[in-house]
Amino acid sequence: MKRFRKSLIPLLIMLALNIPVITNAYSGSYSFSINSSVKRSTKHSLAKKKTTTTVKANTYYTGDIIKTKDSYQVSLNRGLSSYSITPTLANGSSYSISFGTVKKGDYTVNVYKTTRKTYGATVKGSGTIKQYAKVY
């Protein structure tokens, strides 16, 4: 039993030293105010890495938050390449959603209003595009 413990301690130390630490490699923000299906564009230079967006929006009518909530969709576009998240409800909550791994290049962030439950309603919000790097 003592021999097992003696060999287990160095093994645990070696495993602990191999645990990767994840840091923020890129972070860029965007904001939007959409009355219909108009898009708002912001450019970001991204590496070939896993990419996420954290986004928060709400639905307004004549400057006030309303109970009926519209939906919106965020996409990253570069030429023929496009990465999108599923339509998200503009209810004031913050969502963190992954685009997956994107190809390296300059991307435009476009936000589209996907539903129009209240005529004249506006979806206003902001978000952050993030990429992470593993540091050993």
Image: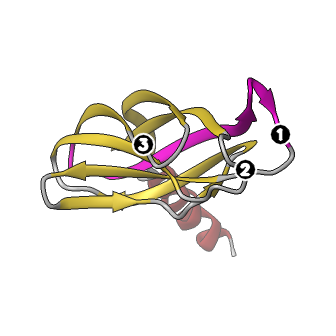
Residue on which the image places disc 3: 38
Mark 2 to mark 3 CA distance (whole Å):
16 Å
Mark 2 to mark 1 CA distance (whole Å):
9 Å
Residue on which the image places disc 2: 118
Nearer the observer, 14 or 46: 46
Tag 1: residue type? Ile
Residue at far right of view: 67
Counting residues from the N terminus, which is met first, the one under dot 1 or under dot 3? 3
Q: Position of residue 79 (x, y in %)?
A: 12, 53
Quadrant housing the N terminus: bottom right
Mark 1 to mark 3 CA distance (whole Å):
20 Å
Nearer the observer, 1 or 18: 18
Label drawn at residue 66: 1
Left or right position of 56 against 108: right
Relative vertical location of residue 88 with respect to residue 130 in this rendering, above or below: below
Tell me, yes or no, whether the two marked residues, 1 and 3, touch with CB atoms within 8 Å.
no
Extent of the magenta region: 47-66
Q: Secondary structure at mark 3?
A: loop
Relative vertical location of residue 46 with respect to residue 77 in this rendering, above or below: above
Q: Position of residue 56 (x, y in %)?
A: 64, 38
Tag 3: residue type? Val
Left or right position of 90 against 35: right
